[in-house]
Image (spheres, rainbow, N blue to C red):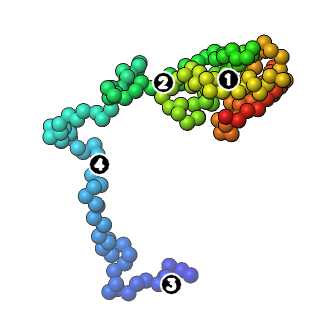
Amino acid sequence: MTNDDAPFPPEDEPSELEKPAAPAAPEPPFAEPVAALSAADDEADAEGLEEVEPAATAMTGTLPEPPRAPSAPRRPDLADRRDPLYRECRGYRLRLDPPDLARLRELPGSRGKTDTEIGESFFDGQADRLAASIVDDVPSGSEVRVVVDPYSRQAFLALENRIRGILSF
């Protein structure tokens, strides 16, 4: 095929180069560059705003105790006892360790009491029964640990690493 044989458009049709270009799509109004905003615009926007106090501030250190109603009872210190509570009864030394004192908090009527008060109250009602339940099995003068299960409402009496008695309360 030679250049003479190439098809040419008819004379009345414009060539591709002579055709008018398609109109460009209009740019959206938000397409302005951000840098085009002047410092004067920023100052004008800031003048209309009033200073707002922050909702919260960060503080370090200790906070003051919140105020409480004068009729509200003082909350007991739940970490009251770090040493065991003892009671002498019938020649035995009954011992409630701090974890067992803490378990006594689950019993009804212990709200608002310290661990010492709860333990003393428990021994007041149960010490004689606890000592009587092991009198035939444990020699007098022994130190017996009282392990409390408040959910089954049982006290386990342990001498060294053996359970010597179980008493429901």
| Residue depth check, mark 4 versus mark 2: number of the one nearer the observer | 2
Q: Quadrant of the N terminus?
A: bottom right
Q: CA distance from mark 4 to mark 2?
A: 66 Å
Q: CA distance from mark 1 to mark 2?
A: 24 Å
Q: Given the image, on which type of amino acid does mark 4 rest? A: Pro
Q: CA distance from mark 1 to mark 4?
A: 86 Å
Give residue 50's quadrant in the image. Answer: top left
Which residue was labeled with disc 2? Answer: 76
Q: Is residue 108 left or right of residue 127?
A: left
Q: Residue 127, labelled with which disc?
A: 1
Q: Residues within 10 Å of mark 4 (few under 14, many from 20)?
A: few
Q: Residues within 10 Å of mark 3 (few under 14, many from 20)?
A: few
Q: Residues within 10 Å of mark 1 (few under 14, many from 20)?
A: many
Q: Given the image, on which type of amino acid does mark 1 rest? A: Ala
Which residue was labeled with disc 3? Answer: 5
Position of 149 relative to 21 (above/below): above
Earlier in the chain: of badge 3 and badge 4, it is 3
Q: What is the secondary structure assignment of the residue under circle 2?
A: loop
Q: Given the image, on which type of amino acid does mark 3 rest? A: Asp
Earlier in the chain: of badge 1 and badge 4, it is 4
Residue 43 seen in the current view: no
Kindly indicate whether the residue at mark 3 contacts the one at mark 1 (C-beta within 8 angstroms): no
Q: Nearer the viewer, residue 137 or 81?
A: 137
| Residue depth check, mark 2 versus mark 3: number of the one nearer the observer | 2
Earlier in the chain: of badge 4 and badge 2, it is 4
Earlier in the chain: of badge 2 and badge 3, it is 3
| Residue depth check, mark 1 versus mark 2: number of the one nearer the observer | 1
| Residue depth check, mark 1 versus mark 3: number of the one nearer the observer | 1
Kindly indicate whether the residue at mark 4 contacts the one at mark 3 (C-beta within 8 angstroms): no
Q: Residue at x 74, y 30 (%)?
A: 156
Which residue was labeled with disc 4? Answer: 33
User: How many numbered markers are drawn?
Assistant: 4
